[in-house]
Image: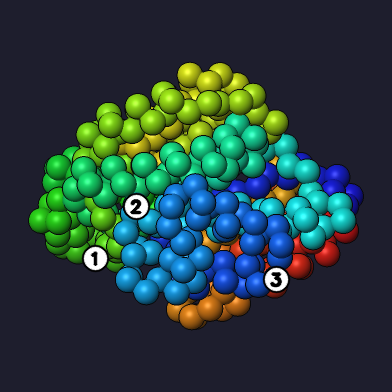
Amino acid sequence: MSDNEKRVIFIFPGQGSQYPGMGSDLFTDFDAARSIYEEASDILGYDMTKLSFDDPNDRINLTRYTQPVLLTHQIACLSAYRALAEMPLRPIAAAGHSLGEYSALVAAEVLTFADALRLVAKRGELMGDFGEGEMAALTLDLDTARPLADKHYCGIAGLNLPDQTVVGGAAADLDALAAEMAEIMPRKRAVRLKTEGAFHTYYMVEAARRFREALDQTEIADASLKVLSNYTGGYHENSAETIKSRLFFQLFHPVNWIGCLQTALDDNIELFMEFGGGIGDGDGPTEKRPNLEGMVKKFTRRADPKPGYIPAINSATIREAAHISA
């Protein structure tokens, strides 16, 4: 069976996969990507290329800018891939981790790029302005993490893997949680994350309340693909009001990435293809590695048959993906 005949899902990462210089290779190499960056600058009223490529004022890690930067990069990668491949893969579904869910909705034509960009710009602004707290990734399963989080007034923020649960809370509360973990579970880790707030917890309720107005004003179209919901872990209903409500609840409920991955496996997904973002210590796009690859491969390692994985996160991997699809 060729890749073109497989059951494919397009996936998009969330915050933490941004870096200065992202997209600079795409802008140089692909007309389709250049068009996306120019459209983003027109919509937002600031130079998306300068922010993404140079970041002269060190703003790329501020949530209000991180989210538009990532969405633009992800859709630029997707657009470049589709323009380059003679026979681009045709997915049956799309999914994104937190912010990436908006890119998945663009891929499914539920949101236009312009509307999604306006939404994530407002979402990032509100999360930065009204969010509080910090986040930590615990090498614990949910059943072990929850009572510990509850004890220290922290909220469950993400279910990344069966043995990786993200929590959010006040800095002092996270310190106390980490200290207790070190005492009673010395082999487990609490890794602090670089965020502006305790995203996807009760600390985001006020941001969500204010974000609802932006959601209410946004047009939602019928989906061309099934899209996974971070809030439920299952597929969105093809209902505008339900999609909006789940995006609202997503802001202050855990990202159920385990549920999304399990739903994909239950739906017999045979190939994951990741667009945008990049992590690692290297400076430029060519030195970055995909954000979601490790989680996908770890979660699916015992699946039979084991699904494949293709990255499309920079010019080089997009060219490779286009060649695979041919």
Secondary structure at numbered mark 2: helix
Q: Check disc 2 and report the residue beneath it.
A: 64
Give residue 177's position: percent from left, percent from top.
17, 54
Q: Would you say residue 159 is visible in this rendering?
A: no
Quadrant occupied by the C terminus: bottom right
Mark 2 or mark 1: which is in front? 2
Secondary structure beneath dot 3 equals helix
Q: Of 71 and 225, which appears nearest the observer?
A: 71
Q: Which residue is drawn at 32% across and 41% down?
A: 200
* Image quadrant where residue 216 sits: top left
Mark 2 or 1 closer to N-term?
A: 2
Q: Is residue 207 left or right of residue 236?
A: left
> Looking at the picture, how far across and down is residue 61, in whole percent?
35, 63
In the rendered image, which quarter is residue 54 located in?
bottom left
Q: Name the residue under label 3.
A: 29
Residue corresponding to mark 1: 186
